Image: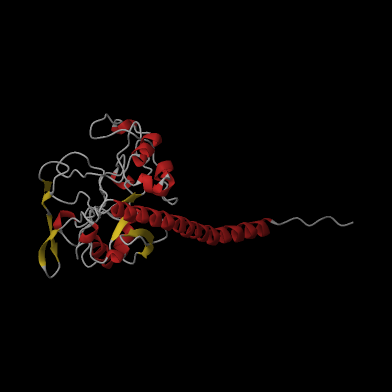
């Protein structure tokens, strides 16, 4: 019987090269497939949050839930949808001690979610976290943020200058931004559902990655038109779903948005820190959906 023929070194190298080539093709495809799959779950989360947001205003005579986590200072927001991290979910951050910024645990973060005004309508902390958001496992404490979503600052959030009469008083001064071709304009904050024009085009939840800003939790809400400039990002959507993000809207529906401008994607991925981006169609679309009264 003849001896079995062994692989030559050249043949072995060819096989290894073929395997490496196949892996270089398959692995990115698997990553894209995973991002698409997490996007589907995230879209369901956004739908659930938007529905809860809509139900809340229905139960409270059209008043919108507070869209910020700020409970003190000039931009304090009453009736907040979530709270900052708390020792217990029954804590009131307006009068109770809260964990030190460098001692926040996951349980403190979940307590803040459960203490929010929307939690009775959602009943599940998982709804507040996108499965594509790896911040809570990628970042070291205390930057391991859990909550993936934020409410825009003009949806009863903190995007204004001042209130009169404290946290429960009316807004007395609005922020002003420069709009292309039409000069300056006040950024009016919606406080009731009837303030919102075209609810199907105005988003109320957006994915936000705050790890790039080294925040210990998702502060405030999602704000646009930095420094009063229409073409300047202040916050920007997260990069979790293969050049797409999910958003929840004021009529209760949710959808994916594909980003087209390379500057948007580079900012989201942390490749650039250039927030001033004139004529960015992605930013224009976000701004139009950000303005509840237009």
Q: Would you say residue 56 is visible in this rendering?
A: yes
Q: What residue appears at the point 75 percent right and 55 percent down from the top-left corner?
A: 6
Q: Nearer the viewer, residue 279 or 86?
A: 86
Above or below residue 139? Residue 30 is below
Scheme by which the image is coloured: secondary structure
Q: What residue appears at the point 56 percent right and 61 percent down from the top-left corner?
A: 21
Q: Nearer the viewer, residue 79 or 136?
A: 79
Left or right of 33 on screen, residue 205: left
Above or below residue 187? Residue 125 is above
Q: What residue appears at the point 36 percent right and 37 percent down from the top-left corner?
A: 111
Above or below residue 216? Residue 276 is below
Q: Residue 272: image x %, image y %? A: 29, 55
Left or right of 94 on screen, residue 131: right
User: Number of callouts in the render?
Assistant: 0
Q: Residue 53: image x %, image y %? A: 32, 53
Q: Nearer the viewer, residue 74 or 226?
A: 74
Left or right of 166 on screen, residue 288: right
Outermost residue on the right side: it is 1
Q: Nearer the viewer, residue 183 or 116?
A: 116
Q: Quadrant of the N terminus?
A: bottom right
Q: Quadrant of the C terminus?
A: bottom left
Residue 146, quarter of picture: top left
Outermost residue on the bottom side: it is 181
Q: Residue 165: image x %, image y %? A: 10, 42
Q: Would you say residue 239 is visible in this rendering?
A: no
């Amino acid at each position: 019987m003849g001896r079995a023929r062994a692989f030559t070194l050249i043949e072995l190298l060819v096989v290894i090269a073929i395997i490496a080539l196949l892996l270089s093709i398959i692995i990115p495809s698997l990553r894209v497939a995973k991002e698409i799959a997490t996007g589907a779950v995230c879209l369901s989360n956004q739908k659930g949050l938007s529905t809860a947001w809509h139900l809340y205003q229905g139960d409270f005579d059209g008043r919108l839930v507070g869209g910020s986590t700020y409970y003190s200072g000039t931009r304090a927001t009453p009736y907040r949808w979530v709270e900052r991290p708390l020792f217990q979910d029954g804590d009131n951050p307006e009068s109770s001690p809260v964990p030190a910024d460098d001692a926040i645990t996951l349980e403190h973060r979940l307590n803040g979610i459960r203490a929010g005004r929307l939690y009775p309508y959602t009943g599940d902390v998982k709804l507040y976290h996108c499965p594509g958001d790896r911040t809570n496992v990628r970042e070291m404490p205390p930057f391991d943020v859990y909550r993936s979503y934020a409410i825009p600052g003009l949806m009863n959030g903190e995007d204004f200058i001042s209130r009169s009469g404290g946290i429960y008083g009316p807004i007395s001064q609005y922020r002003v931004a420069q709009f292309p071709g039409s000069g300056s304009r006040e950024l009016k904050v919606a406080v009731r559902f009837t303030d919102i024009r075209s609810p199907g085009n105005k988003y109320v939840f957006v994915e936000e990655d705050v790890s790039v800003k080294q925040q210990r939790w998702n502060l405030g809400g999602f704000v646009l038109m930095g420094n009063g400039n229409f073409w300047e990002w202040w916050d920007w959507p997260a990069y979790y779903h293969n050049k797409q993000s999910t958003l929840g809207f004021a009529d209760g529906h949710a959808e994916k948005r594909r980003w087209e401008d390379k500057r948007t994607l580079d900012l989201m991925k942390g490749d650039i820190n250039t927030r001033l981006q004139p004529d960015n169609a992605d930013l224009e679309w976000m701004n139009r959906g950000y303005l509840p009264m237009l």
